[in-house]
Amino acid sequence: MPHRAHPAQHRPPRPTLHQPPGTPIYSGPPREHEVRLQLVTYNESVAEEHAAHGGAEVLRRAGAWRRPDRITWVHVDGVHDVEIVGLLGDVFELHGLAVEDIVTLETRAKAEDYGLSVVINLKHLRLSEGTDAELSAEHISLVLGEGWVLSFQELPAPLFSGVRTRVMQARGRIRQRAADYLLHALLDAIIDDYRAIADRFSDAVDALEERPTDRFDESLPGDVHRLKAQLQAFRRAAKPVREALAILEHARPELVHKGTLPFFRDLLAHLNEVVELSESLRERLDNTLELHLALASHRMNETMRVLTVVTAIFIPLSFIAGVYGMNFDQMPELHKPWGYPMVLGLMAMLAAGLLWRFRRSGWI
C-alpha cells in the first residue's frame, strides 16, 4: 500500500509575525463552512444537547451553559472564526496563550497547565482508503476545567460522535464520573484512530515483505521511501502526545481526580505501543529494502561471475586465433595438413582445462 505525503502547497500559511503574545491569529487555509457549536450538559440522571451558530448566539447563551450541578461539554466544529473561539475563551476564562494555540493549526502536540484549566493540543490523523492512501492531520484542542470540557475540531467530522452517544444514552460509566473522565473518553477516541492507522501501516509493511525476492522489484524502493515518510509523519504526531498525557498526572486534584489517573495511564500505555510499533515498522522497512538490494547485488555478482568465466575462457582462445590469423607466409603450421586440427584441439583442451579449474575453485 503506497502512501503519499501532502504537497507543499497544502500547508497552511504562516501567521503574521511580531504580534503580542496571546494574540489569536488563525493560521490555517481558508474555510467556508460556518462554525458550529454543540452543547451537552449532563449528570448521572439527565443529559441535554443543544446546537448554536455564530458569536451572538454564543454570548446570549453563555450564562446558561455552565451549571454547577452538571458536566458541561462544548464542542466546536471549526476554529477559523477567531471571534467565536475568543468568546468561548472569555466565557470559560481561558488564558490568552491557550486561545492562541487553539487557532494556530501548526501548534505542536502538547499540554499546558494554566491552573484553572489544562489545554491539550494534538493532531487527529486520517489515512485515506485505497492503494494510494494519503495520511492527513487535523488540529484538535481539548480543554479541561472544573466541571467542563471544551473540544475544538478543525473540520466537521463525527470524531466524537461515539462519545456523545455514550453520554446521551448513559452507556458505561461516563455519566457517573467527573469532567476529567469525559476528557479521557475524547482522548481515547483519538488514540483509537492512531492504533487503527498503525495496524494499517503494519499490513502495508507485511505486503512489502511478502513481495517476491526471485527478481528485483523496481517499484519497491519508491514504495518503501513513501511509507517511511508517512511513518515518520505519524510518529512525529503521536510521540508528543505522550508528554501531554504525562502532564495530566500533575494537574490540580480538582481537575484530574485520583480515580481517573489509571485511565490516563492506560491511554499512555496504548500510545507507547503505537509509537514503538511505528519505530519497529521503520526498522522492518529498512531491513526489507536492504534484503532486496542485497539480493539484487548478489544476482548481479552471479551474472558478473558468469561473464568473467566466459571472458577468461575466450581470451586465450582469441589470442591463439589472432596469432594464426596473421597474414605471414613463414608460419610452418599453416602448410601442414595437421596444423588446423592441432590448433582446434589445443583451443579445446585449453577451454576444457579452464572450465575444470573454475569448477574446482567453485566459480561455476
Image (spheres, grey):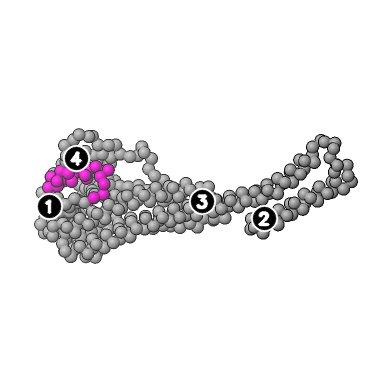
Which mark, by number, is residue 61? none
The segment highlighted magenta reads: 87-110
Q: Residue tagged by mark 3?
A: 293
Which mark, by number, is residue 116? 1
Amino acid marked by disc 3: Leu
Give 34 or 143, whichever is nearer the viewer. Answer: 143
> Mark 1, residues whose alpha carbon is within 10 Å: few (<14), some, or many (≥20)?
some
* Mark in the foreground, 1 or 2: 2
* Mark in the foreground, 3 or 4: 3
The answer to whether residue 107 is magenta is yes
The residue positioned 10% from the left and 57% from the top of the image is 68
Marks 1/2: CA distance?
83 Å
Asked if residue 308 lies left or right of residue 28, the reply is right
Tell me which numbered mark, 2 or 4, is placed earlier along the sequence. Answer: 4
Marks 4/1: CA distance?
20 Å
The residue positioned 56% from the left and 53% from the top of the image is 298
Q: Percent from the top left, x then y, of residue 29?
A: 30, 38
